[in-house]
Image (cartoon, rainbow, N blue to C red):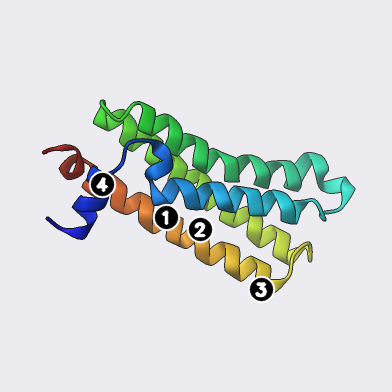
Amino acid sequence: MTEDRKQMTSIKSVKDLKVYKLSYKLAMEIFEVTKKFPKEETYSLTDQIRRSSRSVTINIREGFAKRKYEQIFIRHLNDAFGSSEETRGWLEFSLDCSYMTKDQYEKLDKQYDEVNAMLYSLMEKWESYEKP
């Protein structure tokens, strides 16, 4: 049995998925970083980046709940991928508006790249994980 397959057979809840845990951690990091954004951004950039980062996690969770229906699960993972890319776009705006440091941006962007790789892998391999 491959290492990936062993890991997947031990998944009992969405919280066992590495991509879920990482996306949740990143959404919380973005929440903390955006507390320092200017007040005039509260209903625009701050709101948008918080919502898109949370959407990644929530789409993974909702899809996992419907994993019995593979295409629905894949659709939610694809939506999570889209929200991850949206978040990366807002991160870029945040950097260019000088609301975060280059180090903060690079760290978060790199981790969202990792989330995307995990989502892609999960979309490609899920069927083989679900079969005994």
The quadrant holding residue 100 is bottom right
Query: First in sequence: mark 3 or mark 1?
Result: 3
Q: CA distance from mark 1 to mark 4?
A: 18 Å
Residue 40, position as x, y percentages in the image: 88, 46
Q: Which residue is under mark 3?
A: 103
Q: Which residue is under mark 2?
A: 112
* SS type, badge 1: helix
Q: Which residue is under mark 4?
A: 8
Crowdedness near tag 2: few (<14), some (14–19) or many (≥20) residues, C-alpha within 10 Å: many
Q: CA distance from mark 4 to mark 3?
A: 33 Å
* SS type, badge 2: helix
Residue 10, position as x, y percentages in the image: 27, 44
Query: First in sequence: mark 4 or mark 3?
Result: 4
Give the residue type that dot 2 points to: Tyr
89 sits to left or right of 72: right
Q: Nearer the viewer, residue 63 or 89?
A: 63
Q: Nearer the viewer, mark 4 or mark 3?
A: 4
Give the residue type that dot 4 points to: Met
Crowdedness near tag 3: few (<14), some (14–19) or many (≥20) residues, C-alpha within 10 Å: few
Residue 116, position as x, y percentages in the image: 42, 55
Query: First in sequence: mark 1 or mark 4?
Result: 4
Give the residue type that dot 3 points to: Asp
Q: Which residue is under mark 1?
A: 116
Relative to 45, does residue 68 appear above or below in the rendering?
A: above
Residue at the location (44% across, 34% down)?
A: 61
Residue at the location (76% across, 43% down)?
A: 44
131 sits to left or right of 105: left
